[in-house]
Image (cartoon, rainbow, N blue to C red):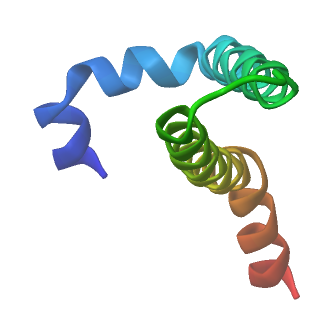
Amino acid sequence: MASMASSLPWLVALSEYKLATFGFTALALGYSWWQVQQLGKAEACSIAEAKRLRFQGWVLRAATVIFGISVFAAYALLPIVMWFDNS
């Protein structure tokens, strides 16, 4: 961990603002989900736009899963490991 912090010093500064970073990311993902839902409600769209919208939905799902894993690793993983170590 120390070698990673020395080679990536911005990571230490970013970890100090973890709540703001995850909050901004959650807002951006929420806005993206809302945009995809609004575009999906449009009545007239071409086949190319429908394929693009479907692809965007899959990318958004993948980004949301990665975000969920990141939040778990940042906030829940250490307390769980510490709980298992004390058991």
What is the count of numbered marks? 0
Residue at the image point whose x is 74% and y is 81% from the top: 85
Q: Quadrant of the C terminus?
A: bottom right
* Residue at x 66% of width, y 55% of height: 65
Residue at 83% from the left image edge and 28% from the top image edge: 37
Residue shown at 66% from the left, 51% from the top? 61
Closer-to-camera residue (72/59): 59
73 versus 74 height, above or below: below
- Could you say which is closer to the camera, residue 37 or residue 63? 37
Front residue of this view, candidates 45 and 64: 45
In the rendered image, residue 31, in percent from the top left (x then y), is placed at 75, 15
Left or right: where 56 falls relative to 76: left
Q: Position of residue 4 (x, y in %)?
A: 21, 45
Q: Name the residue nearer the viewer: 66 or 56.
A: 56
Left or right of residue 81: residue 14: left
Q: Residue furthest left?
A: 7
Measured as percent of width and height from the top left, residue 67 is found at: 63, 44
Image coords of residue 54 (percent x, y): 60, 48
Question: From the viewer's perspective, is residue 57 above or below residue 41?
Answer: below
